[in-house]
Structure formats: structure tokens, C-alpha cells
Image (cartoon, coloured by chain):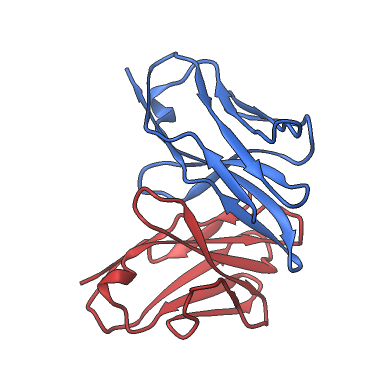
Chain colours: A red, B blue
């Protein structure tokens, strides 16, 4: 199946710094990428959807100025957590799909710990 | 809105036992249904899917049948192994605003003991 990678897999940072997470589709062109957040023992919560070359669409309650999403190419999307705080510590997972109706493929996730 | 309800875990089974994880959904349209598996410390992997009523998805010995009349998509496996220990997520996908939006259940943790 299609492969989606994320980098880094683990990041620890100090409060107030910004962290960038990359999501890449390795063997297909991802027209749309999705960013999810997963809290311990809970399900995935969709944060935003991004189409290549367009501004991301954020879910209700997600601060777009805090979670900056860029989908500059058909194989790369980035999520930047700006001025991170301990409450931003979480597991961030991206997914990607080619065309509407096709299966979403998920990345392995990035664990963020803000001290 | 659309939602997915899964049985609460954790589910603990002995090796070679029969597994059922219940999943029901509510949706405004005609969704596709999925089961994803998440192994410890990893992201989600698609386990199986079904796109229309009475379809059966299957993979690695796991099966689930799309039941429109009962709005269910229960996951089953005849004989579980220790390596099946993971969290299983039921999900539905519907076209929303021009793209497929996936709604996940809360996940069911499965622990298989030797």
C-alpha cells in the first residue's frame, strides 16, 4: 500500500518554542492531507484538512494561528506548532490521499512533549 | 452529526480465542466503513474496509461485514494471536465539503495473553 512518513517521530522542546512536523507521501501524490491529534487513550481528532496549494480548513476549536499548516507540494505538508506549551503535548498524526474517494493512508505519528 | 460507537475496552483474550469488537455508526449519508489498527507507539494502519452494504472486508484473518440494516461493522477473528495486541479503531468516511471526512470511534484496546 501507499506509504506516508512523518518527521520527526519524537520531539521534546521547551515551552515557548515552535516545532515543525513534516508529513510526506512517498509513493503517490497527495492532493489532500489531514492532520489529527490523539490524546492518551482517546480517539483521533481531526485538526485540519489541507489541499495542495490552498489554505487549510480548520476544524472548529482549532486555533489556526497556533497550528500553522502548509501544503506546498503534492508530497509534503507541514504542521508548525507555534509557541508550544505543555498542553500541546500530544501525538500528532497526518494522513494523505490522492483523489476524492480514495483511501486515506496514515503516517506513523509524531510524539510531541513540551516541557 | 456522524458518529462511531465502539465497545469499550480493554478486551483481554487468551491466544486462539475468538474475537468480536462491536462497532455501530450513525451517518447522514452512505458511508464507507473501516477498521484501523494501531500498534504500541505507532500510527494507524488500515486493516480492512467495506464500501457498500453487505460487503465483507477481510485481512490477516480479520473480517467485518457492512450491515446497513443494523448500521454495524463488527470486527471478528477466529483465532487471535499475541501479535494482534493493539488498539483497534472503527471509522466511517463520508463526502463532506468536497472531501472525504473520516470519523473515528474511541478505539478498543485488545490484549492477547499466551
Between B93 and B39, the residue placed more toward the observer is B93
A68 to the left or right of A84: right
Q: Residue furthest front?
A: B1
Residue at 34% across, 52% down: A40
x and y percentages locating residue B10 in the rendered image: 37, 32
Q: Please name whichever residue, A6 or B10, is drawn nearer the observer in this view of the structure.
A: B10
Residue B87 against residue A109 in the figure, above or below: above
Residue B1 percent coordinates (x, y): 64, 56
Count all numbered tags in the image, as a single digit. 0
Q: Is residue B16 above or below residue A38?
A: above
Q: Position of residue A11 (x, y in %)?
A: 30, 68
Instruction: Answer with the quarter of the image where residue A114 lies.
Output: bottom left
Left of A62 or right of it: where is B3?
A: right
Q: Quadrant of the C terminus of chain A?
A: bottom left
Q: Residue at x 75, y 34 (%)?
A: B68
Q: Residue at x 46, y 86 (%)?
A: A65
**Looking at this rendering, what residue extends furthest in the top direction?**
B16
At 48% across and 55% down in the image, what residue appears?
A: A44
Q: Position of residue B62 (x, y in %)?
A: 58, 26
The correct choice, above or below, for A58 with respect to A28 in the image is: below
Relative to B51, residue A88 above or below: below
Amino acid at each position: 500500500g501507499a506509504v506516508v512518513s512523518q518527521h520527526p517521530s519524537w520531539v521534546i522542546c521547551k515551552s515557548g518554542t515552535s516545532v515543525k512536523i513534516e508529513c510526506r507521501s512517498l509513493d503517490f501524490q497527495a492532493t489532500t492531507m489531514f492532520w489529527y491529534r490523539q490524546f492518551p487513550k482517546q480517539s483521533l481528532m481531526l485538526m485540519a484538512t489541507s489541499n495542495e496549494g490552498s489554505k487549510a480548513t480548520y476544524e472548529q476549536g482549532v486555533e489556526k494561528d497556533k497550528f500553522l499548516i502548509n501544503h506546498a507540494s503534492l508530497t509534503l505538508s507541514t504542521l508548525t506548532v507555534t509557541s508550544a506549551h505543555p498542553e500541546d503535548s500530544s501525538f500528532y498524526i497526518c494522513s494523505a490521499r490522492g483523489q476524492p474517494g480514495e483511501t486515506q493512508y496514515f503516517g506513523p505519528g509524531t510524539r510531541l512533549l513540551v516541557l | 452529526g456522524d458518529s462511531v460507537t465502539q465497545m469499550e475496552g480493554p478486551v483481554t483474550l487468551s491466544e486462539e480465542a475468538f474475537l468480536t469488537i462491536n462497532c455501530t455508526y450513525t451517518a447522514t449519508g452512505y458511508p464507507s466503513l473501516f477498521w484501523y489498527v494501531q500498534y504500541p507507539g505507532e500510527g494507524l494502519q488500515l486493516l480492512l474496509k467495506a464500501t457498500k452494504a453487505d460487503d465483507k472486508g477481510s485481512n490477516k484473518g480479520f473480517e467485518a461485514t457492512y450491515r446497513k440494516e443494523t448500521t454495524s461493522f463488527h470486527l471478528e477473528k477466529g483465532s487471535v494471536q499475541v501479535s494482534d495486541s493493539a488498539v483497534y479503531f472503527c471509522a466511517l468516511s463520508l463526502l463532506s465539503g468536497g472531501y472525504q471526512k473520516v470519523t473515528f470511534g474511541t478505539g478498543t484496546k485488545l490484549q492477547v495473553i499466551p
